[in-house]
Image (spheres, grey):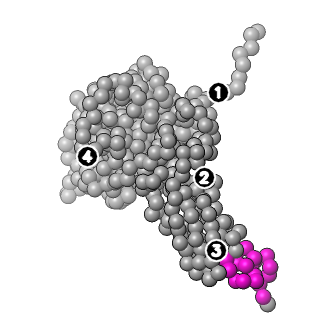
Amino acid sequence: MPPSKETHIPMSDTLTGQPALDAINAALATVQDPEINRPITELGMLKDVQIGADGAVHVAVYLTVAGCPMRETITNRVTQAVGAVAGVTSVQVELDVMNDEQRAELRKTVRGSDTADPVIPFAQPGSLTRVYAVASGKGGVGKSSVTVNLAAALAKRGLSVGVVDADIYGHSVPRMLGVDDKPTQVDNMIMPPQSYGVKVISIGMFTPGNTPVVWRGPMLHRALQQFLADVWWGDLDVLLMDLPPGTGDVAISVAQLVPNAEILVVTTPQLAAAEVAERAGAIATQTHQQVVGVVENMSWMDLPDGTRMEVFGSGGGEAVSDALTKTLGARVPLLGQIPLDTRLREAGDSGAPIVLAEPDSPAAKALEKIADSLAVRQRGLSGMSLGLTPVKH
């Protein structure tokens, strides 16, 4: 029995055997832009489709900018999608570049507005994105390592995750996440590169080589504001912000720009480090932010004979947890203790987070446990409009 009309027509033309235009357009509707994560057909990126007599298909696609780093990915996705349509014998992809009007329309489509001054989506009352500001009292406690591994672990769970490298002077997140691509700029909208499913932005992506950044407070504030407002993050479940150590300009800017951000304090077991870390969390008393918890890094080293060596002492994480609980008047839990492991350092240097590269290692398991506690948390009512009006009695 020949195939029914309903099953045959969407695949190819019944009279000529050529692939049907509707089927090709349906296939192209499944191709997502790798930076915006929306179909190219919705973004005005599909320029033209031509079908040859021999089943050869020519697809013309608009790129947002001439130097788009995702041009090869887009080409491959279009080729694979169209090539799977019955009757298609070959696929040729031609790349063109949007003009200013088309980019403006794209920006309006993506943002839902053509406003010249984009707002910070995470600071809006209806935002469902959990924002975690990863802080430490001093440098060298592994704050960035914790940030990138938590990001990778959360993304592995299927969550949409972004990371802002807010440590402008000491940026290290791109290396730790293995990000080599540069952001793509569409007018005043910046598309962040991705690694392991995590969207990332860092000042290191805009400076040549290892050039130091020498800025004062107002410049730091403006850079952070652009990272939050001008970057197209999409609909994130979690945004992690890797803060510089201490309670300086960036910590204050975060409180001003994203007041609903919750602080995650990283310390080592050493009591001297714990005292400084306590101050990093206690800033919440002035900024009226919530401290989600404490992470103790470099807690101990597992020795071959099964014993533990407490290289940096013990009790620092619990001390910070207890002190912040007393200071803030709300329970600040110790979310986890991460053992000292050379593989954690090696993974960061190679750009492959240990939760992905060595998932069975003790450090990876500790980080996964912390990620579990963050992943299951539901967004609270803090910062949300409840639609209630006070009534006088």
The kind of residue on which mark 2 rests is: Leu
Q: Is residue 120 above or below residue 173?
A: above
**Front tag of 4 and 3:** 3
Q: Quadrant of the C terminus?
A: top right
User: Distance of mark 3 from mark 1, alpha carbons?
Assistant: 53 Å
Q: Is residue 221 left or right of residue 47?
A: left
- The structure residue drawn at horizontal position 21% and vertical position 39%, both measured from the top left corner, is 312
Residue carrying label 2? 43
Does any portion of residue 151 appear in the rendered image? no
Q: Which mark is residue 202?
A: none
- The structure residue drawn at horizontal position 46% and vertical position 45%, both measured from the top left corner, is 185
Residue 14 in magenta?
Answer: yes
User: Distance of mark 1 from mark 2, alpha carbons?
Assistant: 32 Å
The kind of residue on which mark 1 rests is: Ser
**Front tag of 4 and 1:** 4
Q: Give the mark, 4 or 1, whose residue is nearer the N terminus.
A: 4
Residue carrying label 4? 209
- The structure residue drawn at horizontal position 58% and vertical position 56%, both measured from the top left corner, is 45
Q: Secondary structure at mark 1?
A: loop
Residue carrying label 1? 385
Q: Is residue 288 above or below residue 20?
A: above
Q: Secondary structure at mark 4?
A: loop
Q: Which mark is residue 51?
A: 3
